[in-house]
């Protein structure tokens, strides 16, 4: 079930929390929703889940207008909110059964759904404990379990791995990847390596506006404007090597990465430059000991797009 946002705008007083956002998320796609605090991520998620209404624009879920089909479409959405409100005095198993009833799951299926959610989110040891007795990480798992209890076609997850330890993050990441094969998933997080490991596509907003939309690879290429190779060439004069590398047709710029070690950063517009560098070294009888592509980090791209 796909999600389409058309010219979405939401104001709080004079401030635009969301400013004319348009977006499409396809069925089976995992979208990483990024932005600094206050950028409009949570507001957008609340609009998609119909917790709040936009001032302008439209939301379509599975081709149907959300504002005209609120009750029907909310049944297809699972939502883990940023604050993850839970009933601290309820045991985990009772809380999940309660959530299943709220979602209208048949009584004959509630027990099996609860068991399945406990298994998927690794809550078996904690299932009889009161939620208030759990660590933040396990409470987050309970929140994820309640979002999935009714087997929704769409999952909206606001900071789903908040409070989890590294091992738990990997487990939940794998679960989200598995769910993404069949469901539409939008997740917000500040853990940028997690986005690269989990998401098919990245959407970045800043001050309520779209600043980037694409895969991690496409965002890197867009940020760099060219490919960059880290090259180390031995048995040659560094200045001569520099001039020879600069003379290659597809090379736009050469920089000394470490002059004393004959290391260079080679900016190029074609992947074929690898062959040209290898051929050059063979002809000049230089020893090529390193040639690796340099990737711009997602953190650098994020900072560049959201610092202003």
Image (spheres, rainbow, N blue to C red):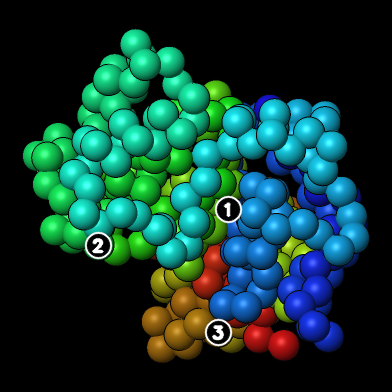
The mark nearer the N terminus, 3 or 2, is: 2
Inspect this view and state whether residue 33 appears.
yes
Q: Is residue 305 above or below residue 14?
A: above
Is label 2 in a helix, a strand or a loop? helix
Considering depth in this image, is 115 or 204 the residue closer to the camera? 115
Quadrant of the image occupied by residue 63: top right
The mark nearer the N terminus, 1 or 2, is: 1
- Give residue 49's position: percent from left, percent from top: 64, 47
Q: Is residue 129 above or below residue 249?
A: above
**Which residue: 66% across, 86% down?**
307
What's the distance in space between the residues labelled 3 and 2, CA to CA?
A: 48 Å
Q: Which residue is mark 1?
A: 32
Q: Which residue is mark 2?
A: 136
Q: Which residue is mark 3?
A: 256
Other residues around mark 1 within 10 Å, as few (<14) / some (14–19) / many (≥20): many
**Which residue: 22% across, 42% down?**
92
Is label 1 in a helix, a strand or a loop? strand
Decide if residue 253 is on the left or right side of residue 166. right
Decide if residue 298 is on the left or right side of residue 226. left
Considering depth in this image, is 265 or 276 the residue closer to the camera? 265
Do callouts 1 and 2 mark residues in contact (Cβ within 8 Å)? no
What's the distance in space between the residues labelled 1 and 2, CA to CA?
A: 22 Å
- Give residue 217's position: percent from left, percent from top: 62, 53
């Amino acid at each position: 079930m796909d999600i389409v946002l058309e010219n979405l705008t939401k104001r709080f007083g004079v401030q635009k929390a969301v400013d004319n956002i348009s977006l499409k998320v396809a069925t089976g796609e995992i979208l990483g929703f990024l932005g600094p605090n206050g950028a409009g991520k949570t507001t957008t998620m609340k609009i998609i889940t119909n917790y709040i209404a936009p001032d302008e624009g439209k939301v379509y879920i599975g081709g149907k207008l959300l504002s005209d089909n609120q009750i029907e479409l909310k049944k297809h959405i699972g939502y883990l909110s940023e604050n993850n409100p839970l009933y601290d005095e309820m045991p985990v198993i009772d809380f999940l059964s309660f959530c299943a009833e709220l979602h209208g799951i048949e009584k004959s299926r509630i027990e099996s759904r609860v068991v399945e959610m406990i298994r998927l989110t690794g809550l078996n040891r904690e299932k009889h404990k009161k939620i208030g007795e759990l660590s933040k990480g396990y409470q987050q798992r309970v929140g994820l379990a309640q979002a999935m209890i009714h087997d929704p076609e769409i999952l909206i997850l606001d900071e789903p791995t908040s409070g989890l330890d590294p091992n738990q993050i990997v487990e939940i990441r794998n679960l989200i990847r598995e769910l993404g094969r069949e469901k539409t998933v939008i997740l917000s997080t500040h853990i940028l390596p997690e986005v690269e490991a989990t998401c098919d596509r990245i959407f970045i907003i800043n001050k309520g506006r779209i600043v980037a939309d694409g895969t991690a690879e496409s965002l890197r290429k867009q940020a760099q404007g060219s490919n960059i190779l880290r090259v180390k060439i031995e048995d040659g004069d560094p200045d001569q090597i520099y001039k020879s590398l600069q003379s290659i047709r597809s090379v736009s710029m050469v920089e000394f990465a470490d002059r004393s070690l004959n290391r260079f950063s080679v900016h190029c517009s074609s992947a074929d430059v690898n062959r040209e560098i290898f051929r050059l070294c063979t002809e000049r009888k230089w020893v090529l000991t390193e040639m690796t592509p340099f990737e711009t980090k997602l953190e650098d791209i994020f900072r560049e797009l959201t610092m202003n």
